[in-house]
Image: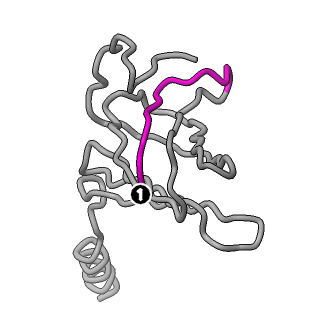
Amino acid sequence: MNKVILLVLVLGFTGFAQDNANKPQRLKYVTTAPDGSVAMTITDDSSKDNLKLESVNNFYRFEILDPITGEAVLASKNQGKECDIDKTKLASGTYNLRLYTSNFVITSKIAINNTKKVLPSLQPTDDVVASR
């Protein structure tokens, strides 16, 4: 009798177990101003190739920096309060994201978990900078 109950319990637990390995994850990084208001939000949907960057204020530039060297590994000009950042240009790891507005600079730490193949290095252009 105890074996039957144990078997039913084991089957019940395995039936309700969820497989999250293949489900997309959505991470949200929120950076707040000193007064506690939201200054910047970064949304990372693992099923998409882009990060969504949104700011309360208009920003004219962002940079993604290597946390050890402080060198920009990706940067771009911007107009407005939001933009998309191509994750395929970044290797998996932790980075510092710096956002420039006309009045201040916002910095946030982000983690990139890039399961897709990273594109080879691009040549520097006016809009994308490989290094500082």
Start and end of the magenta stretch? Answer: 68-81
Residue at the right extreme? 34
Q: Is residue 123 left or right of residue 7?
A: right
User: In which quadrant is the N terminus drawn?
Assistant: bottom left
User: In which quadrant is the C terminus drawn?
Assistant: top right
Task: State the residue in front, 95 or 93.
Answer: 95
Question: Percent from the top left, x then y, of residue 51?
Answer: 37, 48
Question: Percent from the top left, x then y, of residue 84?
Answer: 34, 47
Question: Percent from the top left, x then y, of residue 2?
Answer: 34, 85
Task: Determine the residue positioned at 41% across, 40% down.
Answer: 113
Task: Determine the residue positioned at 43% across, 59% down.
Answer: 27
For mark 1, does the 10 Å Cα neighbourhood hold few (<14), some (14 to 19), or many (20 or more) residues?
Answer: some
Task: Determine the residue positioned at 26% across, 26% down.
Answer: 117
Quarter of the figure with residue 16 = bottom left
The vertical placement of 7 against 29, above or below, is below
Task: State the residue in front, 108 or 18.
Answer: 108
Dot 1 falls on a residue whose secondary structure is strand
Residue 63 included in the magenta stretch of the image: no
Q: Disc 1 designates what residue?
A: 43
The vertical placement of 27 against 63, above or below, is below
Which kind of residue does numbered mark 1 sit on?
Thr
Task: State the residue in front, 40 or 30.
Answer: 40
Task: Determine the residue positioned at 67% across, 20% down.
Answer: 69
Q: How is the image coloured?
A: one colour
